[in-house]
Image (cartoon, rainbow, N blue to C red):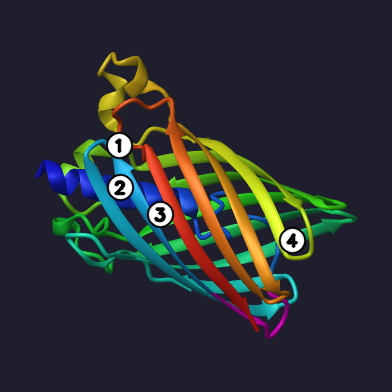
Amino acid sequence: MMLRLALSALSSCFLLQSAHANHPLVTDDTNTQDSGHQQLELNTDWLRQDDTHSHIVNFTYSYGLLKNLDIYVNPPATLSDPSGINDIALGVKWRLLEKGDFSLGVKPEITFPSGDPDRGLGHGATSMSLILISSYQSGDWAFSGNLAAYYNRFRLPGDQQANRTVQWRLSGYALYELSPKWSVAVDAGILSNTERASDTSGDLHSSSNPGYILTGAVYSPTPNLDLDLGLKFGIGCGACAAQTHRQVGVGVTWRF
């Protein structure tokens, strides 16, 4: 039971924080594919929480319905034991405002219970999220900020008792383009604690809202192909399951 809860927390934490942003970043931007254009993303991450290790892979397909509106599907999977498909997400990204180098967007998403919650591979019930996105471009610098809200439903009584239904995330990144082929980024944020027990534990580390800091690099051998590497550390959460202690990942993105 404890192992299942730990694996479920790791998977939920990964899915919540990534929110299908451009890997390896957690924070998303307002960029869309343009009408008729497509994007394929494949990335894999190794997560560590105390003595529990997990290996997760994500595949995301995006299609540009309009110049400023994308639809995407994301079927993640766990490769470590117990392995299997996690909850599949379907969402849209709409860049609703552009004013010079500044833009605003929204990203609603629905997650379907395709994973097996008895094995720690999903929630077992449909969940939803909404992300507000702001982006700003200035020369070789790019900045983005997110305010995300998650409404999580759980099928298993144990998961319902252990986890909050509503969560939020506040995050931002700064990216610098070293050259046409190389970019580096720093991403940081905080996420509301997933554990209901944090209200009554009295543990300062457990009751605090966990944060993270991430550093990443992106190599683009061609304008439509990105190879990335990221390293993320959880901070301010002690032994809580709301934030992984360490995460390293690699990915590839192809636009066509």
Q: Is 201 or 52 nearer to us in this picture?
A: 52
Distance from Cα at disc 2 to Cα at disc 3: 9 Å
Amino acid type shown at disc 3: Leu
Q: Which residue does the numbered mark 3 point to in the structure image? A: 15
Question: Circle 2 is placed at which residue position?
Answer: 10
Which one is in front in this view, the residue at disc 4 or the one at disc 2? 2
Q: Nearer the viewer, mark 1 or mark 4?
A: 1
Q: Which mark is residue 93?
A: none
Which quarter of the image is occupied by the N terminus? top left
What is the magenta range?
Answer: 33-40
Q: Identify the mark nearer the N-term, 2 or 3.
A: 2
Task: Return the x and y of residue 232 as percentages of the image width and height.
Answer: 48, 43
User: Looking at the picture, which amino acid does disc 4 mark?
Assistant: Leu
Which of disc 3 and disc 1 is earlier in sequence? Answer: 3
The disc, 1 or 4, on the residue closer to the chain's N-terminal end is: 4
Mark positioned earlier in the residue sequence (4 or 2): 2
Label 4 belongs to which residue?
96
CA neighbours of label 1 inside 10 A, class few (<14), some (14 to 19), many (20+): many
Of helix, strand and loop, which one carries label 1? loop
199 or 75: nearer the viewer: 75
Density class for disc 3 (Cα within 10 Å; few <14, some 14-19, many ≥20) is some
Based on the picture, tell me whether residue 38 belongs to the magenta stretch: yes
Q: Residue at x 65, y 84 (%)?
A: 256
Q: Could you classify mark 4 by the number of other residues whose Cα lies within 10 Å: few (under 14), some (14-19), or many (20 or more)?
A: few
Query: Residue 151, can we see it?
Result: no
Q: Which three-letter amino acid code belongs to the residue tagged 2?
A: Leu
Tell me the SS state at disc 3.
helix
Quick check: is 36 in the magenta stretch? Answer: yes
